[in-house]
Image (spheres, helix red, strand yellow):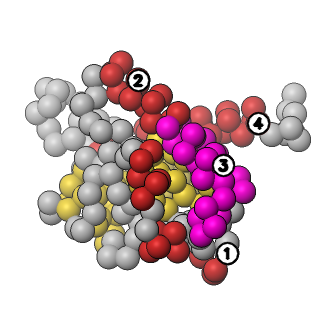
Amino acid sequence: MFAQCGEVNFHEGLGMDCLRSNVDALLTKIKRKYKEYGINEKPFVVVKADNGTYGMGIMTVRDVKDLEEINRKTKNKMSTAKDGMEISQVIIQEGVHTNERVNAAVAEPVVYMMDRYVVGGFYRVHSERGVDENLNSLGAQFVPLAFDKSAHMPQPGAKPGASVPNRFYMYGVIGRLAMLAASYELEATDPEAEVYE
């Protein structure tokens, strides 16, 4: 789930009503979904620049009240992105808890694809960040996704849960599903899409 706000200026406090109302609405929807699916975590959203972030211009919001108490450091962080580009539009995304660990540090998988094929990946690891924080920041490390056995298929004949989970296979399936969903979304929202017969 996501929302957008345009004409936002964190330094001058412009567009904050839009931001607060969208964060509140999104957190309410997420809480409802968490209850429906029995998820016992505190929901959060990620507010980030809507023009590419490169790990900059990102903040986690756990409660709409957090937006009332933004300090100067956060205002500065949310005012400019890479190369000093001013942030004037933000996207508000449903936060996803990061439950993976590498050497006890929070880790998230990154999968590379070419066309429809999964071709590689790595874990982004950050020992100083929590499960609901942006790992793409100073101090992040990168660990290859490496496996002893083939990552193409699950282990045939093994009892469920008996073998080491083939995470690369699982991440690949999720990556392919995400790519398929994104292609449907692009097709549905592009007014100048090419028509193939």
Contact, mark 2 vs mark 1 (Cβ under 8 Å): no
> Closer to the N terminus: mark 3 or mark 1?
3
Q: In the rendered view, would you say 50 is above or below 162?
A: below
Return the residue found at the far left.
162
Give the crowd class for mark 1: few <14, some 14-19, many >=20 residues within 10 Å. few
Alpha carbon separation for disc pair 2 and 3: 22 Å
Give the crowd class for mark 4: few <14, some 14-19, many >=20 residues within 10 Å. few
* 18 part of magenta stretch: yes
Question: Pointer 3: what residue?
Answer: 5
Identified at 40% across, 71% down, the residue is: 137
**Viewer-proximal residue among 2 and 126:** 2
Q: Is residue 41 left or right of residue 85?
A: left
The secondary structure type at the circle numbered 1 is loop
Alpha carbon separation for disc pair 4 and 2: 27 Å
For the residues carrying marks 4 and 2, which lies nearer the camera in this image? 2
Kindly identify the amino acid type of the residue bearing the numbered disc 4: Thr
Kindly identify the amino acid type of the residue bearing the numbered disc 3: Cys
Alpha carbon separation for disc pair 2 and 1: 36 Å
Q: Is residue 197 left or right of residue 107?
A: right
Question: Pointer 4: what residue?
Answer: 189
Contact, mark 4 vs mark 2 (Cβ under 8 Å): no
Question: Pointer 1: what residue?
Answer: 85
Contact, mark 4 vs mark 3 (Cβ under 8 Å): no
Magenta highlight range: 1-24
Q: Which mark is residue 32?
A: 2
Contact, mark 3 vs mark 1 (Cβ under 8 Å): no
The secondary structure type at the circle numbered 4 is helix
